[in-house]
Amino acid sequence: MSKTFKVAIDGPAGSGKSTIAKEIAKIFNLYYLDSGALYRAFGYFVKKMNFDLFNEDDIIKALKDFDIKIIDGEYYLGDEKLGMQIRTPEIGKAASIVAKNEKVRNKVNEILKSLSKIHNVVIDGRDIGTVVLPDADVKIFLTASIEERARRRYKELLEKGKNVNYEEIYKEIEKRDIADSTRDIAPLKPAEDAITVDTTGKDIKTVVDEISKIINKKINQE
Ligand code: CDP
Ligand code: CDP
């Protein structure tokens, strides 16, 4: 089997990973995988089952019954299509808690790795360039100031008709930044060979163009 082409996009909450990854997927005809959605889906499932996010036995039980499918880019938990119900700050927090568990990380990584063996992919997350795809052809680390990231998330939720509070979102992102970058396994950090792109003050098109240039350069080298 020929080697697949892989792009890893990592970065903190609200840095624009999923927006940029989706655009990159369209431009370069790659299969887009949202690793955060898998952690969110698992956190959502644990809560739905009334299990304890911190209890190892509950996590093991939940992992056994975790029936996640990706069909045409949509995520399903059993028959339930996952949309805004996994995009709330509450589920973001739950995802961040379950993401500390090694068994959960192994499960998510297994899904991502097996798909990246059969598809050309762009995957976004926290540890894609460092752990999931250490051999990725292109590794991008997106950043932006915390104020800008909180503003983006606030605007997004407001536009979707959610009742949101900027201060709450800011605090939730700040807490998640700390939790994600200080945990023992797979902490959020740029891979040594990642290219860091600071998106503060840059619109989506500017960032997509910048990353497209990096990918094109790589393709032309190969
Ligand atoms: O969209 P946002 O950046 O807010 O979060 P997400 O990418 O949906 O991820 C939700 C949570 O899952 C993160 O805060 C991380 O704790 C965890 N996560 C992770 O640990 N590793 C990944 N590769 C992706 C997400
Ligand atoms: O996936 P991640 O949490 O890193 O961020 P996202 O969900 O892709 O982006 C969060 C919000 O910021 C979305 O509403 C994007 O449209 C917006 N965004 C932006 O305004 N400017 C950028 N350069 C990137 C994203």
Image (tube, rainbow, N blue to C red):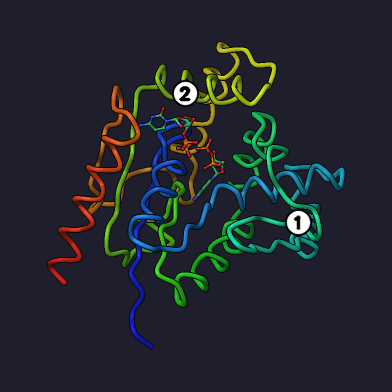
Q: Position of residue 176 (x, y in %)?
A: 53, 31
Q: Is mark 2 within 8 Å of ligand 2?
A: yes
Residue at image mark 1: 77
- Quadrant of the rendered image containing residue 203: top left
Instruction: Specify the amino acid type for callout 2.
Output: Arg
Q: Residue at x 25, y 50 (%)?
A: 212
**Residue placed furthest toward the bottom:** 1
**Residue placed furthest toward the left:** 221
Q: Are marks 2 and 1 in contact (CB under 8 Å)?
A: no
Above or below: residue 177 compared with residue 127: above
Report the front residue among 195 and 158. 158
Horizontal arrangement in the rendering, residue 107 relative to residue 8 (left or right)? right
- Quadrant of the rendered image containing residue 146: top left
Q: Position of residue 107 (x, y in %)?
A: 61, 63
Above or below: residue 175 compared with residue 214: above
Report the front residue among 100 and 163. 163
Whichever of labels 2 and 1 marks the residue nearer the N terminus, that label is 1
Circle 1 residues within 10 Å: few <14, some 14–19, many ≥20: some
Horizontal arrangement in the rendering, residue 32 relative to residue 209 (left or right)? right
Q: Residue at x 47, y 23 (%)?
A: 152
Q: Tell me, for residue 9, which label it has, or none.
A: none
Residue at image mark 2: 152
> How many marks do you count on the picture?
2
Which element carries disc 2, helix, strand or loop?
Answer: helix
Q: Residue at x 80, y 52 (%)?
A: 58
Instruction: Specify the amino acid type for callout 1.
Output: Leu
Report the front residue among 127 and 140. 140
Please state, as top left, top right, bottom left or bottom right, where the C terminus lies in the image.
bottom left
Circle 2 residues within 10 Å: few <14, some 14–19, many ≥20: some
